[in-house]
Amino acid sequence: MKTLYLVRHAKSSWDFPELSDFDRPLNKRGERDAPRMGKYLKEKNILPDLFLASPAKRALTTAQKIAREVGYHSEISTDQGMFHSGGNQLLRILREQKDQFNSIMMFGHNPGFTGFVNELANESIGNVPTCGVCQVNFNIYSWSEVKFGDGELIFFQFPKGL
């Protein structure tokens, strides 16, 4: 059994038009929502084996804030390929992960993450909002076995629903 948590980055700021999209920070709501979602995950006793994030500032900051709340003390891995990628690219990245990790939390962006969770679990979530978290379970032994449609959506939570 393998467990995947997909986390869309928390709300980002558009206050600095001189910054590239990659360098946009979290806004006040994002700064508040990421730790809140981390506390929710800790209450559910969720502590993944690996945190894997897009290196974009808003995604990596979200990962750091959630890691702090859930007690994840290992290095947060990043993959440039997760920045604004679609389902096929995200699937390739997931399939490359080491099988020693039974649970992985990926931090990234829309529209890719909403499409990815829908493809993995054959669901029809209209939108994963900022700082939304989806848990998808797979009855497999190796991440290389992940296929679209083979996952089961266990939960979908976002800050406004807490």
Image (cartoon, grey):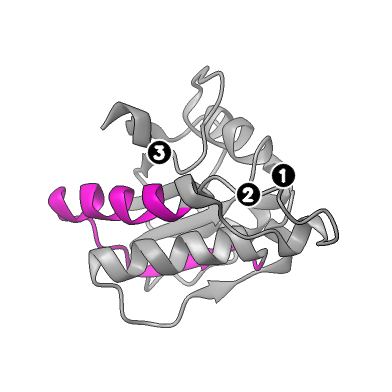
Three-letter residue code for mark 3: Cys
Instruction: Magenta stretch: give its range.
Output: 31-55
Circles 1 and 3, Cβ within 8 Å, touching? The answer is no
Q: Which residue is the site of mark 2?
A: 91
The residue sitting at 48% across, 59% down in the picture is: 62
Q: Nearer the viewer, mark 1 or mark 3?
A: 3
> Badge 2 local density, few (<14 within 10 Å), some, or many (20+)?
some
Name the one closer to the observer, 38 or 50: 38
**Residue 54, percent from left and from top:** 63, 62
Residue 36 falls inside the magenta stretch: yes
**Residue 100, percent from left and from top:** 37, 73
Q: Which residue is the site of mark 3?
A: 134
Does 48 sit above or below residue 3? below
Rounded to the nearest angstrom, the CA distance separating label 1 from label 3 is 18 Å
Mark 1 vs mark 3: which is more N-terminal? 1
For the residue labelled by badge 2, is the local secondary structure a helix, a strand or a loop?
helix
Rounded to the nearest angstrom, the CA distance separating label 2 from label 3 is 15 Å
Does 60 sit above or below residue 92? below
Quadrant of the rendered image containing residue 42: bottom left
